[in-house]
Structures are given as structure tokens and as C-alpha cells.
Amino acid sequence: MDTQSFRQTLAQFATGVTVVISGTGDLIHGMTVNSFTSVSLVPPLILFCAENRADTFQAILAVRRFTVSILSDQQEELSRRFALIGPQHELFQQTPCQSGIAAIPYLSESLAYLDCAVYDIVAAGDHHIVVGQVDQLALLKSGRPLLYYQSDYYRPVSLPPD
Ligand SMILES: Cc1cc2nc3c(=O)[nH]c(=O)nc-3n(C[C@H](O)[C@H](O)[C@H](O)COP(=O)(O)O)c2cc1C
């Protein structure tokens, strides 16, 4: 099995899109994440997979907390920008955010957000599996989710608007 067929096969799986944010002040970092999923109801756990070198993962290791914003189909541009490597000060200044627990921001125009404490971190190849315990959450806006499929963005036209 080569890397390309591995990628191509996994690209058949459609997902939603989230932005995971951690850190505060000068150490703040956010990244686009589609490996997000639910894990447990009691206690309430979610997970996502973080590339070992991602700045956001380093921030999570430092502060042991993070937020997850679930993107709407109006937020494709934000998804693209949070997937870029580099300084993010301007991006956070230009994007409507609110502070969650421990002053870690979330994207206030998203469909929903979750505020999590690190429950467990498991090394897995070039990524780590980050399991978060959800301390707070909110539905923020009604709308349709942003979808990611075969390395591209889609809007679910057949879904009702809310
Ligand atoms: C749709 C999409 C989904 C992504 N999902 C993940 C993911 O689940 N885990 C991950 O580590 N990187 C993911 N990435 C890549 C990161 O967003 C990207 O590497 C980002 O630059 C990391 O930012 P940071 O170094 O500032 O934390 C995804 C990118 C896109 C466009």
C-alpha cells in the first residue's frame, strides 16, 4: 500500500470541519481539523488527531485545554485560513471570537462550540490522539455544516437550513 492510495481511500469518507484553538495571549493557535468525533456520553468525551508538529498541539500540551468550533457552510474561508502555517495574530483580530473557559477563544459565528480539558493524549505515528472532556458547550447559530470530501469543500444543499 502506497501513501497515495491510503490518502485516496480515506478521502472517500466525508466529514464536517472544525477549528481547534488553544493557548491565550501571544501563545494562541488555531487549526482546521476534520478528525473530530464523539467518544463517550458519560463522561462526555470527544477526540481529534493532531499532527505532532502543529503549533496548536504544542499549545494544548502547555495549557491542557482547547476549544472546538464546528464550522457552518459560511465559514469555508476561515477553514482555509486556519489550515495555513504561520503567525495568526491578524487572523484572530479579524475573526469574531468569544472567550471560553480559561480565556481560550472560540469562533462565535460557528454552528456550535465545545470547551474541553485534556482527558488523555495518545501517541499515534506522526499524530497524537487528543481526547477532551467537555466542560461547556453551546449551540451558537442555526445553519448548515461545512463538509469536506475528496480534499474539497462542499455545502449540503439537500439538508434543511436548520
Ligand atoms: C479540511 C482540513 C482538515 C484538517 N484536519 C486536520 C486534523 O484533523 N489534524 C491535523 O493535525 N491537521 C489537520 N489539518 C491540517 C492543519 O489545519 C494544518 O496543518 C495547520 O497548519 C496546523 O496549524 P498550526 O501549526 O498553527 O497548529 C486539516 C486541514 C484541512 C484543510
Image: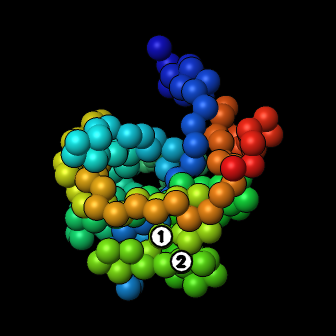
Query: Callout 1, which amino acid?
Result: Tyr
Which label belongs to residue 106? 1
Which label belongs to residue 114? none
Give whichever of discs 2 and 1 has the lower sequence position: 2
- Within 8 Å of ligand 1, the CB of disc 1? no
Quadrant in which residue 155 is drawn: top right
Between residues 159 and 32, which one lies in front from this camera angle? 159
Q: Is residue 111 left or right of residue 50?
A: right
Q: Secondary structure at mark 1?
A: strand
Which label belongs to residue 97? 2
Can residue 126 be seen from the camera position used here? no
Please provide percent x and percent y for residue 25: 38, 85
- Within 8 Å of ligand 1, the CB of disc 2? no
Q: Relative to 68, is 156 above or below?
A: above
Quadrant in which residue 60 is drawn: bottom left
Residue placed at 36% from the left, 55% from the top?
53
Please provide percent x and percent y for residue 97: 53, 77
Please provide percent x and percent y for residue 50: 37, 49
